[in-house]
Image (cartoon, rainbow, N blue to C red):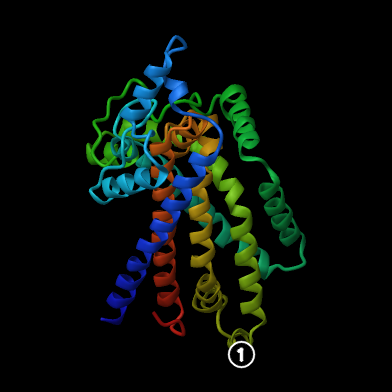
Amino acid sequence: MRLTRYIVRRLLLLIPVLIGVSVLTFVLIRVLPGDPVLLIVPETATEADIQQARERFGLDRPLAAQYLAYLGDVLRGDLGRSITTNTPVAEQLTRRVPLTLELIVYAMGLALVIAVVGGIYAARRAGRPSDHTARVAALAGNSLPEFWLGLVLVLIFYQALGWAPPPAGRISPLFSVPPITGFITVDTLLQGDLPASFSALHHLMLPVLTLAIVITAPLLRSVRASALEVIDSDSYRCAESHGLKDRVLLFAYLFRLTLIRLPTLAALVFGNLLGGSVLVEYVFSWQGLGQWALRGLLLRDYPVIQAYVLVVATFYVLVFLIADLLQAALDPRVEV
């Protein structure tokens, strides 16, 4: 019952957060210089044509009236229509959110595996060459720009070695996969098409590797620091002095206690990935949420930008809620 109340309370906090984010986004994108209507009307358009276009999108009304109309539409589940494409924003979100989530979930999973294994390995060999190598590798990965790293990986694995597919699309054009969940690797498995599933994973290889390399660094440093604290703790030293086997020390003490701090940092990294994968999507022509939002920002497409910010804010709150629940499950001292 306490857990249910906690979840409901956290979800209710999402309402003021989204209202505040929507107000801030709504005002900021409209006070910046530029008029999206001028980008969609022809060069021969008269002032009357421009005014008619503004009226069609409701941009001729006062700012407060525009926001109240927008808020009313959102409460009814209507996120508006794109100014540049005149298509419903909600339909575009349902197509693009799974693409970005599929990309960052695989990247996050790969990064967590590398960070946990590498961080604990480095901590158990603190001060040795292997520890210094892991720390230097983490620092180097954190210093590499995502777009540059993606281009380098394309040159190496596609251009030079031919191991990767062309940096465009989610699957080979030889396959036709009807969408079920929107996650193409899941859809191909649900349909029992293993060659198509392999092709989808093949196309995910380079963008996932690019993101994983960049985000592994902060995770690995955090895991290493937590593991060192556990190794220096009295409980670990006591268990070690009692002659417990190395496997028991590793999994019953070091691994379990090290993971206690990981959910919060992982949630922060995951949230940043959702909003920061735009450059990787651009390099690999991945038609996901980030590339869609970038195009909307460049074209001053108000409904697209507003929907993107709301989706990212919602995911942030939900991801941190899941992180807090995992934290409580791993650490009995934490109450929810």
| Location of residue 2 (image quadrant) | bottom left
Left or right of residue 131, residue 106 in this image? left
Name the residue: 49% across, 54% down. Answer: 270
Name the residue: 33% across, 73% down. Answer: 9
- Whether residue 118 is visible here, answered yes or no, is no
Q: Position of residue 274 (x, y in %)?
A: 47, 48
Q: Is residue 66 above or below residue 36?
A: below
Q: Is residue 233 above or below residue 20?
A: below
Amino acid type for the residue under numbered disc 1? Cys
Residue at image mark 1: 238
| Location of residue 289 (image quadrant) | top left
* Front-lying residue, 230 or 322: 322
Name the residue: 55% across, 80% down. Answer: 245
* Front-lying residue, 49 or 84: 49
- Name the outermost residue toward the top: 44
Q: Crowding at label 1, few (<14), some or many (≥20) Cα neighbours within 10 Å?
A: few
Q: Position of residue 85 (x, y in %)?
A: 36, 25
Left or right of residue 135, residue 206 in this image? left
Q: Is residue 256 above or below residue 46?
A: below
Q: Position of residue 236 (x, y in %)?
A: 60, 84
